[in-house]
C-alpha cells in the first residue's frame, strides 16, 4: 500500500485499511513537514484505491496519538510573508479535507494525547474512539497563534461556539470523559485496548450501515445568521472579551474568529482561519511565545543531560524553618520526598509548619486538596531541633538568615552530621557559593540552590556552581529540583547569580528616574503597561525593602563601576526610616484596609517627601524614555551574563528572567526583546542615554554582534 518514515498504510481483514502514525527516530508523533507530506501521499493512495476500501482506521504506534505540529519549524515559517504562511496552512487543510471526503467511514483511535494538529487530524475523521486516559485540546493560543488546520472550524460546529471559545482561549487539554459528553468522542475505551475497540467500532459502523455522511454534513453545516445567533455571539464576546489583554493578540483574534466563521460556508470558514493564523504568526507575540516553547525544550534537554550523573534523593533536610524553610519543606514533602526541617528555635519550627499548612489550607479551600492529602504531606515533614536522622538524608538545603558568617558556620556544623555522599546546598540569593565553600571540608559536594519566594508558586530554581563544585553535585541538585516540580537553570557563581544580577540594574534605573522627579505611580503604571505584573516600586515593597537594600549593596560591591548609585538610594533612606514595604505596611506605598474592610494601596507621603527633598524640579520625559531607561540596564546586564558564561545560552538567560522575575512572556525575555526591537534600534536607544553611566554602555561583544548582523536567537 504505502510505507513512509512517519505514516504507513496496512491492510486489515474485510477490506479495511489502517493508517498508522509512527514517526521514525522520534519518541512521539508530530506533524512536521515530513509527516504532513506523507499524510498527503497516504490519502492520495486511499483516494485512488477507494473502490477497494470499505473503511479506514487511523491509529498511532506510539504512546500518544499526535503531540501537535513541530514547533521547531515555526521559527523559519514565521519569517515568511502572509501569503506564504497561508499557503503553508492550506497544504495540510487540503489533506484533511481530502481525508474527510473519502467515500467510506473513518475512525480515529486516539491514545495518550491529541493536541493542536493532532486533534485537528482526529476531528477530520468521522468517528473518534478515545482511550480513557487520553487528553485532547487546541493549545495554540499559548503560542500566540490560532489553530491552523481547521481546528477552530470543526470544533465550533461540533460543540457550539461558546464551548469552542472556552477550549480555544484556555488552550487546556480536556479528558476523554468530557470529550464524550460533548460528542467529540463517540466512545471511550480502556487505554490498553483503544485500537482494538476502535477497530470493532469501525466494523460495527459498516455492518450497521451507519450514515457517516450525515456526520460530515453536520460538521460542515453553517450556522444560520439570525437574530438569535447574533445574541449568542454578543453574549460570548461580552463574557470573554473583557478578560483579554491587548498584549496578547491571539485570544482577541480567536474570539472574533470563532464567533464569525460559523455562519460561513465550510471552505470559507477554513479560509478565515488560515488568514487569522498567518496574521498572528507575523506578530512579535507569536515569535516570542513560540520562542519560549523552544527555550523550555532547551531547559528540559539540558536537565536530562545533567541528571545522568545524579544520585537519587530519598530523603532531604532543610536548615532554617521560617517562611522560606517551610516553603521548601512543603515543596519537597508534597512532591514525594520526605524532609527534615531543622531549626534552633521551637517557634521557628512552628512558623515553618504553619507556612506549609497554610499553603495546603488554601488548596483545600479551592478544592484542589482534601484534609487527608494535607495530613499525608505533613507526615512527610519532620520538625527537629537537632541533627537526628541527618546521616540518612541525601540532600540538605541551608535556608538560614542571609549573612555569610552565619551561613558558613551553619554549613560547617552541618557537614559533620551528614554522610560523605550527601549534597549540601545554600539557598542564598546573593552570597558567593565559592566563598561559602571555604568553610567546608568537601567543597565539591556543595552548590547553590536558590529558590524564589513564595516557593510553592515560583517555578525557577537557580542551581549555582561554585569553583570546586563537581558535576555529580550539580546533577543531583538538578534531579532534586525536577523531583520538586521546579525548573532548574544552572548558573556559574557571581554576585547576584543570574536573576538578581540582572534585576538590580533595573532598580538602579528606577532610582535614577525618581531622582529626576518622575513620579512613583507613573513609573509603575508605565512599566505595568509595558507588561510587567507590577511596577518597580510595588515590586520592591513586595520583596521587602530590607531584602532589597541588602542585595543591592552586594551588587554594588560586586560591580562598582556599573552598579554604584549616583546620588542617594531612595530605598536605603526609606529603610533607615523604618519602612519595610508590605512587611510592615509602608514603603513606596502605604497598605491597609479602609472602613469597609477593602484593601488599599496608595503612594506613601513619607516616601514622596524623601524624593521631593532630593529633586530640584521634575523633568519632562516620555513613557517611551521611561521604558528605555528601565529596560536598557536589565537587557545589557543579561548580555554580559551571557558573555561571561554565567549562563550557557540565550534560552537559559531569557527563561531565568521569565520564570524568576515575571518578565513579560509576550516579549520573550530580555534577549528576545532586543532581537524584536532589532540590535541596531536597541543600540541607538542605548547611545541616547550613555551619559547616565556604566549601565548604559554597549559591551564590546554587543558591538561585534551588531557588526556581524548576528541575533541572539
Image: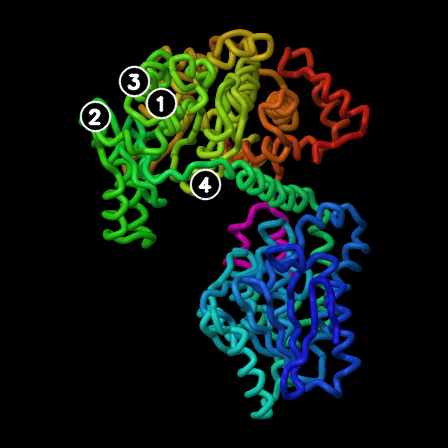
Q: Nearer the viewer, residue 586 or 32?
A: 32
User: Is 107 placed above or below 248 here?
Assistant: below
Q: Which residue is mark 1?
A: 586
What's the magenta bit mostly, secondary-structure-wise? helix
Q: Nearer the viewer, residue 520 or 163?
A: 163
Query: In the rendered structure, which disc, 1 or 2, sits on the residue that comes first in sequence?
Result: 2
- Disc 3 residue crowd, few under 14, some 14–19, many 20+, Cα 10 Å: some
Q: Secondary structure at mark 2?
A: loop
Q: Are marks 4 and 2 in contact (CB under 8 Å)?
A: no
Q: Are marks 3 and 4 in contact (CB under 8 Å)?
A: no
From where the camera sits, is residue 139 visible? yes
Mark 4 → mark 2, Cα distance in angstroms: 28 Å
Report the mark closest to the observer, 1 or 4: 4
Query: In the rendered structure, which disc, 1 or 4, sits on the residue that comes first in sequence?
Result: 4
Q: Are marks 3 and 1 in contact (CB under 8 Å)?
A: no
Q: Which residue is mark 3?
A: 413
Mark 1 → mark 2, Cα distance in angstroms: 37 Å
First to last magenta residue range: 237-260
Report the mark closest to the observer, 3 or 1: 3
User: Is 270 placed above or below 654 here?
Assistant: below
Q: Which residue is mark 4?
A: 482
Q: Which residue is mark 2?
A: 386
Is 323 on the left-hand or right-hand side of 250? Answer: left
Quarter containing the N terminus: bottom right
Mark 2 → mark 3, Cα distance in angstroms: 12 Å
Q: Secondary structure at mark 4?
A: helix
Q: Position of residue 439 (x, y in %)?
A: 38, 13
Amino acid at each position: 500500500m504505502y510505507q513512509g518514515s512517519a505514516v504507513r498504510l496496512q491492510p486489515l481483514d474485510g477490506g479495511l485499511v489502517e493508517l498508522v502514525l509512527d514517526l521514525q527516530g522520534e519518541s512521539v508523533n508530530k506533524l512536521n513537514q515530513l509527516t504532513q507530506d506523507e499524510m498527503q501521499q497516504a490519502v492520495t493512495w486511499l483516494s485512488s484505491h477507494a473502490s477497494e476500501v470499505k473503511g479506514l482506521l487511523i491509529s498511532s504506534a506510539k504512546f500518544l496519538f499526535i503531540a501537535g505540529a513541530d514547533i521547531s519549524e515555526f521559527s523559519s515559517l514565521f519569517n515568511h510573508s502572509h501569503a506564504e504562511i497561508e499557503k503553508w496552512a492550506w497544504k495540510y487543510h487540503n489533506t484533511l479535507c481530502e481525508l474527510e471526503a473519502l467515500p467510506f467511514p473513518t475512525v480515529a483511535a486516539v491514545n495518550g494525547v491529541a493536541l493542536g494538529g493532532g486533534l485537528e487530524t482526529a476531528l477530520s475523521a468521522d468517528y473518534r474512539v478515545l482511550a480513557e486516559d487520553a487528553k485532547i485540546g487546541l493549545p495554540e493560543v499559548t503560542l500566540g497563534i490560532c489553530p491552523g488546520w481547521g481546528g477552530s472550524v470543526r470544533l465550533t460546529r461540533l460543540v457550539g461556539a461558546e464551548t469552542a471559545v472556552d477550549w480555544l482561549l484556555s488552550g487546556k487539554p480536556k479528558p476523554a470523559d468530557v470529550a464524550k459528553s460533548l460528542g467529540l468522542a463517540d466512545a471511550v475505551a480502556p487505554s490498553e485496548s483503544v485500537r482494538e475497540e476502535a477497530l470493532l467500532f469501525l466494523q460495527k459502523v459498516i455492518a450497521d450501515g451507519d450514515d457517516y455522511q450525515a456526520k460530515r454534513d453536520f460538521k460542515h453545516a453553517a450556522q444560520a445568521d439570525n437574530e438569535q445567533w447574533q445574541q449568542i455571539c454578543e453574549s460570548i464576546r461580552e463574557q470573554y472579551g473583557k478578560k483579554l489583554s491587548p498584549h496578547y493578540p491571539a485570544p482577541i483574534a480567536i474570539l472574533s474568529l470563532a464567533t464569525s466563521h460559523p455562519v460561513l460556508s465550510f471552505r470559507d470558514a477554513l479560509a478565515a482561519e488560515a488568514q487569522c493564523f498567518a496574521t498572528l504568526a507575523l506578530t512579535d507575540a507569536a515569535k516570542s511565545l513560540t520562542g519560549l516553547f523552544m527555550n523550555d525544550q532547551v531547559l528540559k534537554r539540558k536537565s536530562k543531560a545533567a541528571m545522568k550523573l545524579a544520585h537519587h534523593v530519598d530523603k532531604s533536610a532543610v536548615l532554617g524553618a521560617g517562611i522560606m524553610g517551610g516553603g521548601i519543606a512543603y515543596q519537597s514533602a508534597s512532591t514525594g520526598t520526605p524532609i527534615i526541617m531543622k531549626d534552633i528555635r521551637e517557634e521557628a519550627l512552628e512558623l515553618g509548619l504553619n507556612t506549609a499548612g497554610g499553603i495546603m489550607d488554601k488548596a483545600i479551600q479551592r478544592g484542589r486538596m482534601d484534609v487527608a492529602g494535607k495530613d499525608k504531606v505533613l507526615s512527610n515533614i519532620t520538625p527537629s531541633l537537632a541533627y537526628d536522622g541527618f546521616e540518612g538524608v541525601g540532600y540538605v538545603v541551608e535556608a538560614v538568615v542571609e549573612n555569610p558568617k552565619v551561613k558558613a558556620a551553619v554549613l560547617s556544623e552541618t557537614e559533620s552530621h551528614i554522610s560523605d555522599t550527601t549534597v549540601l546546598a545554600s539557598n542564598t540569593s546573593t552570597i558567593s557559593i565559592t566563598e561559602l565553600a571555604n568553610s567546608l571540608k568537601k567543597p565539591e559536594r556543595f552548590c547553590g540552590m536558590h529558590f524564589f519566594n513564595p516557593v510553592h508558586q515560583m517555578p525557577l530554581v537557580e542551581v549555582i556552581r561554585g569553583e570546586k563544585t563537581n558535576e555529580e553535585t550539580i546533577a543531583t541538585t538538578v534531579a532534586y529540583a525536577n523531583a520538586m516540580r521546579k525548573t532548574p537553570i544552572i548558573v556559574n557563581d557571581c554576585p547576584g547569580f543570574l536573576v538578581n544580577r540582572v534585576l538590580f540594574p533595573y532598580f538602579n534605573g528606577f532610582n535614577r528616574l525618581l531622582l529626576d522627579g518622575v513620579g512613583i505611580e507613573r513609573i509603575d503604571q508605565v512599566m505595568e503597561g509595558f507588561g510587567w505584573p507590577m511596577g518597580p516600586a510595588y515590586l520592591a515593597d513586595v520583596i521587602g525593602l530590607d531584602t532589597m537594600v541588602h542585595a543591592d549593596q552586594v551588587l554594588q560591591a560586586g560591580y562598582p563601576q556599573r552598579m554604584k548609585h549616583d546620588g542617594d538610594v531612595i530605598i536605603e533612606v526609606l529603610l533607615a526610616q523604618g519602612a519595610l514595604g508590605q512587611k510592615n505596611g509602608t514603603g513606596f506605598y502605604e497598605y491597609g484596609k479602609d472602613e469597609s474592610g477593602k484593601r488599599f494601596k496608595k503612594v506613601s507621603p513619607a516616601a514622596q517627601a524623601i524624593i521631593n527633598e532630593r529633586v530640584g524640579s521634575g523633568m519632562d520625559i516620555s513613557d517611551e524614555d521611561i521604558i528605555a531607561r528601565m529596560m536598557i540596564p536589565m537587557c545589557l546586564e543579561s548580555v554580559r551574563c551571557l558573555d561571561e558564561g554565567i549562563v550557557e545560552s540565550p534560552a537559559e538567560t531569557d527563561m531565568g528572567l521569565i520564570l524568576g522575575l515575571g518578565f513579560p512572556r509576550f516579549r520573550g525575555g530580555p534577549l528576545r526583546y532586543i532581537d524584536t526591537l532589532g540590535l541596531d534600534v536597541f543600540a541607538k536607544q542605548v547611545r541616547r542615554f550613555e551619559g547616565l553611566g556604566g549601565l548604559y554602555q554597549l559591551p564590546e561583544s554587543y558591538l561585534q554582534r551588531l557588526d556581524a548582523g548576528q541575533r541572539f536567537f
